[in-house]
Image (cartoon, helix red, strand yellow):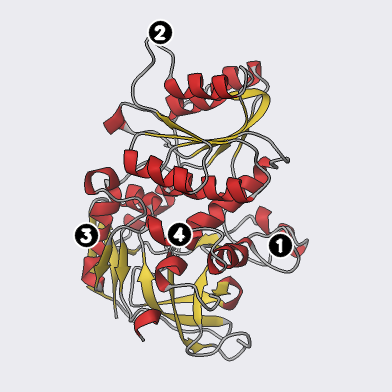
């Protein structure tokens, strides 16, 4: 089959690779759609963020299958011990795979697994014609959810984790920094959750218009500074809250050298926008060595939190991934409007990486999606 292979940082190619082998507890998925995540694009370019060291060590030994944890597909085959799925089922999968054997996993605390693996990062992913994952990682896609939406549901699961971690109480003010795909999903989750005032900041007029459509009460153009030198986002949230600040700040903007921003500047703004004793949830992926303004966080007694990855769950009857898909199925959250670029064929993966690496230059919101198999709506 054909798949994306990283030959070195900045050198991703689509090559012929061996077909994946299906173990007794595995599910083989024929990939329908896949999108390269922003994190994957950063790692391809050699950015020193999470998992960079592991990837560098793997590349030292030769080319590496890489990328593809945001995808959907159709079950092509199952292992001898698999009972929940059969060929033809429409599915996606979570990216974080717990080992199932360490002390944490044995005590039903898989979120603390000491040896997790990550689809597309530490094991082959779905930037390929086919991918094999353990049955426990597979998530069925409900009827009525398009392939486009199913491939884009992983960031929504991340937004749900962030909202849960922030423990938003009824009526609390939520400020979302950044109106990219994660920011726009965070707005929708906050609007459907307990939040009172929902505010969002960004620099792109089209994205800010979407934020309004998705229910943001306050939309702030983050470009420039006010006449007195005050950051416009800080000024707006203080004005809207009587000088108190937001109860919860969801930070999705990260650093952007192109816009003259840095990770530390974004965290500084988040801490200043939060009320004393408030919470900041860091969703964006910062560089490994980004300095954090911990003194400011301590001075204001602001908590800095980071959401978990993977399926997780807060109910015994379902995972966050399953809940995210339910939200899409019943039209509580709009994912499809965020997918602006659709490419066809596995050879388009390199182009999808290029577009996603600089979404602003291409007018993209969500990562560019690649149609590899036949879309469910066309089959």
| Dot 2 and dot 4 residues touching (CB under 8 Å) | no
Name the spot of residue 93 as percent of width and height, x first.
52, 70
At horizontal 47% and vertical 40% (from top left) the residue drawn is 252
Q: Residue 351, which numbered label?
A: 3
- The residue that disc 4 covers is 335
Q: Residues within 10 Å of mark 2 (few under 14, many from 20)?
A: few
Nearer to us: label 1 or label 4: 4
At horizontal 34% and vertical 47% (from top left) the residue drawn is 42
Q: Quick one: label 2 or label 4, which is nearer the N terminus? A: 2
Q: Residue 357, which numbered label?
A: none
Q: Residue 228, which numbered label?
A: 2
Above or below, 226 relative to 49: above
Horizontally, is 315 left or right of 67 in the view? right
Q: Residues within 10 Å of mark 4 (few under 14, many from 20)?
A: many
Name the spot of residue 369 as percent of width and height, x first.
32, 63
Q: Quick one: label 1 or label 2, which is nearer the N terminus? A: 1
Name the spot of residue 65 as percent of width and height, x first.
34, 66
| Dot 1 and dot 2 residues touching (CB under 8 Å) | no
- Numbered disc 3: secondary structure: helix
Pick the quarter of the image with the N terminus: bottom left
- The residue that disc 1 covers is 105
Q: Quick one: label 1 or label 4, which is nearer the N terminus? A: 1
- Numbered disc 2: secondary structure: loop
């Amino acid at each position: 089959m054909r798949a994306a292979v990283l030959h070195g940082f900045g050198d991703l190619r689509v090559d012929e690779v061996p077909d994946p082998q299906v173990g007794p507890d595995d599910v083989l998925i024929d990939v329908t759609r896949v999108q390269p995540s922003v994190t994957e694009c950063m790692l391809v370019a050699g950015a020193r963020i999470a998992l960079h060291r592991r990837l560098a060590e793997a590349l030292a030994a030769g080319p590496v299958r890489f990328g593809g944890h945001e995808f959907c597909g159709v079950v092509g085959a199952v292992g001898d011990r698999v009972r929940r799925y059969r060929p033809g089922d429409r599915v996606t999968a979570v990216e974080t795979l717990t080992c199932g054997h360490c002390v944490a996993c044995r005590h039903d605390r898989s979120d603390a697994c000491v040896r997790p693996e990550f689809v597309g990062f530490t094991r082959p992913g779905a930037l390929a014609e086919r991918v094999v994952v353990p049955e426990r990682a597979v998530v069925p896609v409900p009827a009525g959810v398009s392939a486009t939406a199913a491939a884009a549901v992983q960031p929504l699961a991340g937004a749900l984790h962030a909202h849960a971690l922030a423990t938003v109480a009824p009526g609390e003010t939520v400020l979302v920094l950044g109106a990219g795909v994660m920011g726009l999903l965070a707005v929708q989750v906050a609007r459907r959750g307990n939040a009172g005032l929902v505010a969002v900041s960004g620099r792109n007029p089209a994205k800010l218009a979407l934020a309004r459509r998705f229910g943001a009460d306050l939309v702030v153009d983050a470009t420039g500074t006010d006449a007195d030198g005050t950051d416009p986002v800080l000024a707006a949230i203080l004005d809207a809250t009587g000088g108190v600040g937001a109860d919860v700040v969801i930070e999705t903007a990260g650093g952007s050298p192109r816009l003259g921003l840095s990770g530390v500047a974004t965290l500084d703004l988040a801490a200043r926008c939060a009320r004393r004793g408030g919470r900041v949830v860091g969703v964006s992926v910062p560089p490994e060595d980004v300095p954090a303004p911990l003194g400011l966080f301590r001075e204001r007694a602001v908590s800095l939190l980071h959401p978990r990855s993977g399926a997780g769950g807060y109910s015994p009857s379902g995972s966050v991934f399953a809940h995210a898909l339910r939200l899409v199925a019943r039209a509580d959250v709009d994912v499809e409007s965020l997918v602006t670029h659709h490419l066809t064929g596995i050879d388009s993966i390199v182009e999808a990486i290029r577009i996603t690496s600089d979404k602003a230059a291409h007018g993209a919101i969500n990562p560019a999606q690649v149609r590899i198999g036949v879309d469910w709506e066309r089959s």
